Image (cartoon, rainbow, N blue to C red):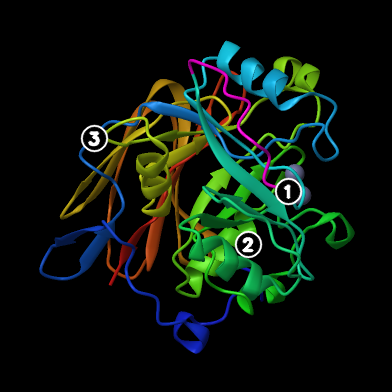
Amino acid sequence: MGTDYLSPSATSPSYEHPLGSQLISSGQFTIYSPYPEEDFRFKGQLHCHTNASDGNNTPQEVVETYRSLGYDFVAITDHDLVTQDPEVPGILFIPGVEESSSSGHILGIGVQRQTDEMRPNKVIGHIQEQGGIAIYAHPNRLPLLGGWSLGGLLSNPGACSIEVLNRGTNSEDKWDSLLTRGYQVWGTVGDDYHMTNSIIKNTNRWVVVAAPDLREESIVAALQNGHFYSTEGPDLSVKVYPWGMTVSTSAEATIEWIARGGVKRKVTQGVKEDSYFIEGDERYVRAVVIRESDKKRALGQPVFIE
Ligand SMILES: [Zn+2]
Ligand SMILES: [Zn+2]
């Protein structure tokens, strides 16, 4: 645990529990779980660029590339611009944007209009007023390149997610800092590629969403409510019980269980399934699946414990 972490009560904003969360009571503690009854099934990309901003390919080429890789939906997030739907059949297009702000980049998913506003809390508000979701983009990138300081995140609450894995950066430490302080934010991932060549050749990151159907409203609502997991490759499924939770995945993996302060409460190697018994003082628990063959990660969303 670093000095980064305050005691949770010190700065906890009074967040409502996420919409659609499931409440499980054990008698000793209550678990707020975002895990839905539906299976995770829709593969989507939440961060990519086209030649409408600083990318090299047309929106049509980008969306066709994701379709060829088996994606069910894609949100194009050009800089400060909501790019028009190129109307590629066979894949759902969700309009998006990557807004600049004075504290760091902010992704907006499911929006119709960009804004010139630079104050981060106003940008987040502008995205949410349109029914979209706001995501703090790549926090651990350099501030000059749109990254976020922890102070910037803490003083601009309200985005429902944080982009934990982006091309070269892992921001799990900042996610844990927010969760430890009581901020209920989901973890997303994104390619942030600017060329279709990179999309095809390089490691990709995507979300897998549990939603009743593949419509924009359903996907955006599921993202808002944490009904998804984020991955660089491994799959995962989660079951939550009054005593704790079980994670399973299809290839041998190390499964880590992370709680308050970013502390690994349990690490199990060489398994396809593992369970965690909640003690009650975790504040939150999230699972990370690290596939043994290639060390690629899948991130489950946190459950919150009171
Ligand atoms: Zn960015
Ligand atoms: Zn970007």
Q: Is mark 2 within 8 Å of ligand 1?
A: no
The label on residue 174 is 2
Give the amino acid type for the residue marked by disc 2 in the picture.
Answer: Lys
Instruction: Find residue 58 and report its image quarter.
Output: top right
Please name the residue that numbered disc 3 is placed on. 38
Of residues 300 and 7, the one nearer the viewer is: 300
Judge the density around disc 3: few (<14), some (14-19), many (≥20) Cα neighbours within 10 Å: few
**Which numbered disc flags the more N-terminal residue, 1 or 2?**
1
Dot 1: few (<14), some (14–19), or many (≥20) neighbours within 10 Å? many
Q: Residue at x 26, y 58 (%)?
A: 21
Q: Which residues are magenta?
A: 81-90
Q: Is residue 89 magenta?
A: yes
Question: Magenta includes 143?
Answer: no
**What residue is drawn where x is 66% and y is 48%?**
97
Three-letter residue code for mark 3: Glu
Label 1 sits on residue:
81
Element marked by disc 2 = helix
